[in-house]
Image (cartoon, helix red, strand yellow):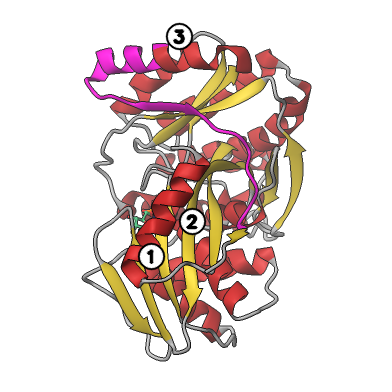
């Protein structure tokens, strides 16, 4: 779908639904981690890129305190009063919007109601952060209609608060940060403790390609929480030797090795992965602009193997996709993306070979698994903001 087609589709749907034109369109991108799985809640680094797949919210202010929200991606619509925000069990996706409204009000902002229509080109629950995108687009709508000055880091924190406290997902800050602060043409090297980032230009010759396994994740939230708990256990034990350690981010490889034997075996595997992966983020950030293909390949190989064997977030579909990606024409390196357990993976491909790569990887993976994947290039796109003002 072209931009113009999407604009037409969504504005017509808005008019049909609400009987008038939208006053604004907020947009917020999805994202992919180029390196740094599960390092965010360990207060470490992530190399993340906001992508040209995004969520729009078309909105028009109301004179009362009602929010009326509908989505072209999921059934159901939801109406709520800003003065009394409850969970919606019938239309659970609206809880992302409700949660943001609640978090913003708790932060002391006075909000205007609106009629809104959501449309996203980000696949759900596959590691590209559609939830952060709908949260960040919601913040943009409220902050624009209510004329609030809220900086991008605060926006990210409000989204995280909504997701953690209202929706009830114990996620780190990475997704929202990336969606709020992304920059066109750049990846972000994010420090998840300091909540600061450096922009890293992505070389035009190295094209990130999303390879969505489309494999249903058999595992749900409990594995994520279990990994977090194992990392925390590692920190508690290592603190006995190094009192300054507050998170795995603070542990050097030498310190870890000196006390590895004192950790339960599974905790040691989890800690090793995080400490190594954190270093790989810094290493890849150096490699990306310089275009050292061998080094990039070594880093992505190690990231994938560590995720599979140490952090144990792999899946048969991911293994099949990894093999297909590594056999693809023009591939430089490939790894998991997002939390693992299926979902999306990311390949770095020579830009000139992307079309052939996509076709070959799709065929190869489908032959191996019987599942039709989605393979598409993504480019670094701007963070959340107003898309445009349209006249009503
Ligand atoms: P991810 O963030 O990896 O895509 P999550 O499970 O965190 O996966 O969030 C996906 C959920 O976010 C969806 O199931 C839905 O509830 C909500 N959501 C995201 N985008 C939209 C949208 N465009 N319309 C309605 N709900 C959405
Ligand atoms: Mg999410």
Q: Which residues are magenta?
A: 360-386
Split into quadrants, the picture shows ligand 1 in the one at bottom left
**Of residues 185 and 364, which is closer to you in this image?**
185
- Left or right, 15 with reference to 137: left
Q: Quadrant of the N terminus?
A: top left
The residue tagged 3 is 327
Identify the residue shown where x is 26% and y is 38%: 216
Which numbered disc flags the more N-terminal residue, 3 or 2?
2
Q: Would you say the residues marked 1 and 3 are in contact, meaning their CB atoms lie under 8 Å apart?
A: no
Find residue 271 and name its label: none
- The residue at label 2 has a CB less than 8 Å from ligand 1: no
Q: Nearer the viewer, mark 3 or mark 2?
A: 2
Question: Do the residues under discs 3 and 2 have CB atoms within 8 angstroms?
Answer: no
The residue labelled by disc 1 is 15
How busy is the neighbourhood of tag 1: few (under 14 within 10 Å), some, or many (20 plus)?
Answer: some
Identify the secondary structure beneath mark 3.
loop
**What secondary structure is marked by label 2?**
strand
Q: Position of residue 328 (x, y in %)?
A: 47, 11
Residue at position x 69%, y 42% in the image: 184
Using the rendered view, name the quadrant where residue 196 is placed: bottom right
Where is residue 314? Give x, y as percent: 37, 32
Q: Which mark lies nearer to you, 1 or 3?
A: 1
Using the rendered image of the protein, determine whether residue 41 is visible from the camera's viewpoint: no
Closer to the eye: label 1 or 2 = 1
The residue that mark 2 highlights is: 56
Is residue 163 found inside the magenta-colored segment of the image? no
x, y percent for residue 330:
56, 10
Which one is nearer the viewer's eye here, 336 or 69?
69
Give 58 or 158, whichever is nearer the viewer: 58
């Amino acid at each position: 779908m072209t931009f113009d087609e999407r604009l037409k589709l969504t504005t017509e749907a808005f008019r049909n639904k609400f009987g008038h034109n939208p006053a604004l369109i907020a947009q917020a991108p999805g994202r992919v981690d180029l390196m740094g799985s599960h390092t965010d809640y360990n207060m470490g680094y992530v190399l993340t890129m906001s992508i040209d797949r995004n969520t729009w919210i078309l909105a028009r202010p109301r004179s009362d305190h009602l929010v009326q929200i509908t989505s072209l991606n999921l059934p159901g619509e939801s109406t709520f009063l800003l003065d009394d925000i409850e969970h919606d069990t019938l239309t659970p996706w609206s809880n992302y919007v409700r949660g943001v409204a609640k978090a913003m009000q708790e932060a002391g902002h006075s909000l205007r109601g609106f009629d809104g229509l959501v449309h996203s080109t980000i696949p759900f629950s596959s590691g590209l952060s559609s939830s952060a995108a709908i949260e960040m687009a919601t913040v943009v709508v409220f902050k624009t209609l209510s004329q609030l000055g809220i900086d991008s880091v605060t926006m990210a924190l409000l989204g995280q608060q909504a997701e953690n406290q209202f929706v009830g997902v114990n996620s780190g800050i990475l997704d929202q940060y990336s969606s709020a602060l992304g920059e066109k043409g750049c990846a972000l090297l994010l420090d998840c403790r300091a909540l600061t980032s450096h922009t890293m230009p992505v070389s035009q010759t190295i094209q990130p390609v999303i390879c969505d396994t489309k494999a249903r994740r058999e595992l749900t939230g409990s594995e994520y929480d279990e990994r977090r708990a194992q990392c925390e256990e590692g920190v508690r034990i290592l603190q006995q030797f190094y009192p300054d350690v507050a998170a795995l981010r603070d542990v050097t490889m030498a310190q870890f090795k000196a006390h590895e034997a004192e950790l339960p075996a599974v905790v040691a595997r989890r800690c090793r992965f995080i400490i190594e992966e954190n270093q790989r983020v810094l290493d890849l950030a150096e490699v990306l602009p310089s275009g050292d293909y061998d080094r990039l390949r070594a880093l992505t190989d190690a990231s994938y193997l560590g995720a599979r064997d140490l952090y144990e977030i792999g899946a048969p579909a991911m293994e099949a996709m990894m093999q297909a990606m590594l056999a693809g024409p023009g591939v430089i390196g490939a790894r998991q993306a997002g939390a693992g357990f299926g979902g999306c993976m990311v390949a770095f491909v020579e830009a000139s070979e992307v079309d052939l790569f996509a076709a070959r990887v799709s065929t190869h993976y489908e032959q191996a698994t019987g599942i039709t994947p989605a393979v598409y290039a993504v480019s670094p796109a701007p963070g959340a903001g107003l898309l445009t003002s349209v006249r009503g």
